[in-house]
Amino acid sequence: MRNHAVVFAALGICSLLLSCGDRTTVPPTTHPDSANWQPLFAADLSDAEYPAGIWSFGNGVLTATEDQCIWTNREYDDYILDLEFMTDAGTNSGVIVHCADTQQWIPNSVEIQIADDYAEQWANSPKTWQCGAFFGHKAPVKSAVKKAGEWNRMTVTSKGRMLYVLLNDEAVNEMNMDLWTSAETNPDGSKIPAWLNKPVAELADRGRIGFQGKHAGAPIYFR
């Protein structure tokens, strides 16, 4: 049985909704009121899986010191995930969904990219590497991320084979997973990075949820 219209409230930061009886529109057209949603992680991270000494939660903020992911200890299918994040100069991170293998999450998941689009290295990268992209697969319709040091809000909706992304009240991306039948070429003809060598269409529409840590030498903060 599927969990319908799920939403998390991780650490008082991210929220997870799991009930179709909730009045939240699916997918939401604005960021929802997630104050009473289920936490994604407990404040002591006792229900998370992560390398010891890497991730910490304090003063309402979750962050990492290395490029290692933090994962839920269970799988989810249909849900709405509501969270806030803040980049530093040059941040490259992500929200990872539908992960079937946390040891080899690339290519066994879908990553919603978080990046400091104002940093030269990401501003000049392919659009599918910029904030709000389904990394390597589909660019956002616009860059809606704020400058480093400012808090952003992101709402990710998983409904069947569809994924939707709201960023700072802008609907920036959506994906029908079944359209990505190739591991080499996206439906629009653009090339997929070689390390994403499993077609998204072959991924299950359920799995672990995770956050990428301090990648590319710059930290990421969630709340």
Image (cartoon, rainbow, N blue to C red):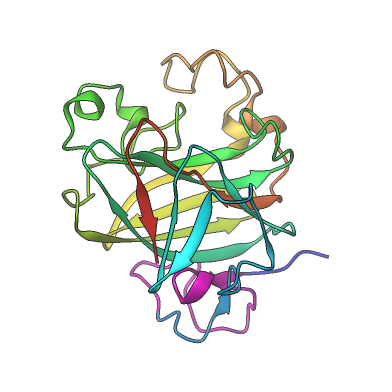
The answer to whether residue 199 is left or right of residue 165 is right
* Nearer-the-camera pick, 64 or 101: 64
The quadrant of the picture occupied by the C terminus is bottom left
The answer to whether residue 111 is left or right of residue 181 is left
Which residue is depicted at the point 66% across and 32% down?
A: 201
Quadrant in the picture for residue 1: bottom right
The answer to whether residue 1 is left or right of residue 183 is right
Vertical comparison of 153 with 205: above or below: below
Which residue is depicted at the point 32% across and 38% down?
A: 218
Which residue is depicted at the point 25% across and 28% down?
A: 122
* Nearer-the-camera pick, 64 or 27: 64
Quadrant in the picture for residue 197: top right
Q: Position of residue 126 (x, y in %)?
A: 31, 22
* Nearer-the-camera pick, 54 or 36: 54
Look at the image and give the residue range highlighted in magenta. 6-32
Q: Position of residue 176 (x, y in %)?
A: 55, 41
Question: Which residue of the protein is positioned furthest toward the front in this rendering?
Answer: 53
Q: Is residue 131 visible?
A: yes
Task: Give the overall secondary structure of the magenta segment.
Answer: loop
